[in-house]
C-alpha cells in the first residue's frame, strides 16, 4: 500500500513540475473531449486559472499522501 501512495506522490510531483516549468508542452498535449474540466476551467478563468487549479490540486494530493506515508 505504501508503494501505491509513493507512486501517487511521484505522479503528482511530475504533474506539478510540468505545470510550473513546462506549461507549453502540457497544454499542447491536453486531449479535448466533448466536456472536460480543463475546458470548463479555461472558459471560466482562462489559462492562468487552469494552471492555478492544477497546481493547487497537485500540492493538496502531495501533502495528503505524504502525511499519510509518515
Image (spheres, rainbow, N blue to C red):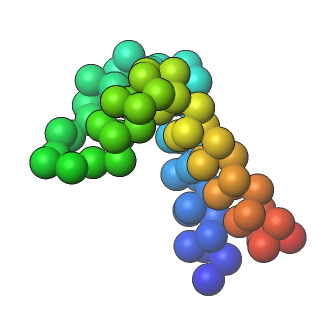
Say whether residue 26 is visible. no
Q: Quadrant of the N terminus?
A: bottom right
Vertical placement of residue 67 versus 57, above or below: below
Expressed as whole percent of the image width and height from the top left, the position of residue 60 reads 69, 53
Q: Nearer the viewer, residue 10 or 64?
A: 64
Q: Nearer the viewer, residue 68 or 43?
A: 43
Q: Which residue lies furthest to the bottom in this view?
A: 1
Residue depicted at 65% across the width and 42% down the height: 56
Vertical placement of residue 59 versus 48, above or below: below
Expressed as whole percent of the image width and height from the top left, the position of residue 41 reads 41, 37
Vertical placement of residue 40 versus 3, above or below: above
Residue depicted at 27% across the width and 48% down the height: 36
Q: Residue furthest right?
A: 70
Q: Is residue 8 left or right of residue 43?
A: right
Say whether residue 30 is visible. yes
- Using the rendered view, name the quadrant where residue 65 is placed: bottom right
Residue depicted at 64% across the width and 64% down the height: 6
Amino acid at each position: 500500500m505504501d508503494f501505491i501512495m509513493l507512486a501517487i506522490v511521484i505522479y503528482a510531483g511530475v504533474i506539478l513540475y510540468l505545470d510550473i516549468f513546462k506549461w507549453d508542452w502540457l497544454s499542447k498535449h491536453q486531449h479535448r473531449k466533448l466536456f472536460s474540466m480543463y475546458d470548463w476551467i479555461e472558459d471560466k478563468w482562462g489559462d492562468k486559472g487552469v494552471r492555478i487549479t492544477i497546481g493547487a490540486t497537485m500540492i493538496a494530493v502531495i501533502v495528503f499522501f505524504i502525511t499519510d506515508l509518515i
